[in-house]
Image (cartoon, rainbow, N blue to C red):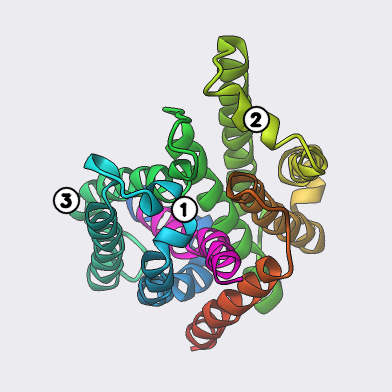
């Protein structure tokens, strides 16, 4: 039961950590290029940035329970997968994310612009650390499986989910918000996420290597194949069909529906990425952990958004 709870906490954390990560990416990009979309989403993104210190605290149970989650930690990993090095890297990731968030609050101008001398290095550091975090926290659940595109794929999913949450918050709390531009950006990220997912599947399947194919076989057995079909429809097919239609992008209700479906589908995707490697199926600790962490995140973000 302790192991199941720790594994459920990891999966929930991997979903909710995308909230500040995606907000960091969106805020840095808007700080460089500008645009009305960033001003529309600015209150929501600012509130999401406030959860960065919270996610550092919520990572502690994952690090403490690592031997109950990662097989290599229980077996006494070495080198890159030695437990002290793994913990040190994880701490470094969240510290750097908090430093970037503090820098945004310090240097951001009233129109959302950021000095290029800060924003560009911050983007590079953010992309590098999120890629490594995806490798460390997700891919090492099956240390024999590798994918060079996996870090970019997970990072794109985090940004997509965070942008969807920001759009849904803007639709809910900012009556009359113009969501056409944010919806177009969300559609572009949807297409990028779908492209990366397809490329990874095609490359691994065509390679037909015995240490890579089982990763996908586990995720197509025991009902997980239906989960994959479900989040593929909700995270790509439905948003693509609706958001390419300009009148739909101008409907706040419809864009909000698409955003909520993308966020929910991303949670299912995170479960699909993690749970099949843990030698167990979906159980009640999984949604409970997602609700508990989500309540903490939404409490912090809502107070800031209301301010």
153, 6: nearer the viewer: 6
Q: Going from the N terminus, do you reach mark 1 or mark 2 first?
A: 1
- Indicate left or right for 252 with 276 as reference: right
Residue that appears at 71% across and 45% down: 235
Mark nearest the camera among 1 and 2 is 2
Mark nearest the camera among 1 and 3 is 3
**Image spot of residue 88 (x, y percent):** 22, 59
Q: Going from the N terminus, do you reach mark 3 or mark 2 first?
A: 3
Picture disc at residue 216: 2
Residue 243 shows in the view: no
- Indicate left or right for 279 with 147 as reference: right
Mark nearest the camera among 3 and 2 is 2
Q: Is residue 42 magenta?
A: no
Residue receiving disc 3: 117
Q: Chief secondary structure of the magenta span?
A: helix
Q: Going from the N terminus, do you reach mark 1 or mark 3 first?
A: 1
Instruction: Classify 10 Å Cα crowding around label 3: few (below 14), some (14-19), many (20 and above).
Output: few
**Image spot of residue 294 (x, y percent):** 59, 75
Among the 4 quarters of the image, the one containing residue 243 = top right
- The residue segment tinted magenta is 1-29
Q: Which quarter of the rendered picture does the N terminus lie within?
A: bottom right
User: How far apart are the alpha carbons under marks 3 and 2?
Assistant: 42 Å
Residue receiving disc 1: 35
């Amino acid at each position: 039961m302790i192991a199941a709870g720790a594994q459920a906490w990891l999966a929930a954390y991997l979903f909710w950590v995308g909230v500040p990560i995606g907000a960091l990416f969106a805020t840095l990009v808007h700080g460089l290029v500008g645009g009305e979309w960033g001003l529309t989403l600015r209150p929501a993104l600012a509130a999401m940035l406030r959860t960065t210190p919270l996610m550092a605290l919520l990572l502690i149970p994952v690090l403490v329970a690592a031997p109950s989650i990662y097989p290599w930690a229980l077996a006494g990993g070495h080198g890159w997968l030695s437990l002290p090095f793994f913990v040190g890297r994880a701490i470094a990731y969240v510290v750097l994310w908090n430093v970037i968030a503090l820098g945004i609050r310090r240097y951001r101008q009233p129109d959302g612009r950021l000095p290029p001398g800060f924003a560009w290095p911050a983007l590079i550091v953010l992309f590098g650390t999120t890629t490594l975090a995806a490798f460390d926290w997700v891919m090492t659940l099956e240390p024999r499986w590798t994918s060079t595109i996996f870090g970019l794929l997970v990072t794109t999913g985090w940004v997509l989910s965070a942008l969807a949450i920001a759009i849904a918050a803007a639709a809910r709390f900012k009556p009359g918000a113009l969501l056409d531009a944010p919806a177009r950006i969300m559609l572009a990220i949807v297409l990028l996420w779908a492209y990366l997912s397809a490329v990874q599947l095609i490359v691994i399947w065509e390679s037909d290597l015995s240490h890579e194919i089982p990763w996908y076989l586990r995720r197509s057995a025991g009902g997980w194949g239906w989960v994959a079909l479900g989040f593929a429809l909700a995270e790509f097919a439905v948003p693509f069909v609706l958001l390419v239609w300009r009148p739909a992008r101008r409907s706040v209700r419809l864009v909000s529906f698409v955003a909520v479906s993308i966020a929910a589908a991303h949670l299912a995707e995170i479960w699909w990425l993690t749970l099949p490697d843990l030698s167990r199926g979906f159980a009640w600790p999984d949604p409970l952990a997602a609700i508990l962490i989500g309540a903490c995140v939404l409490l912090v973000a809502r107070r800031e958004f209301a301010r």
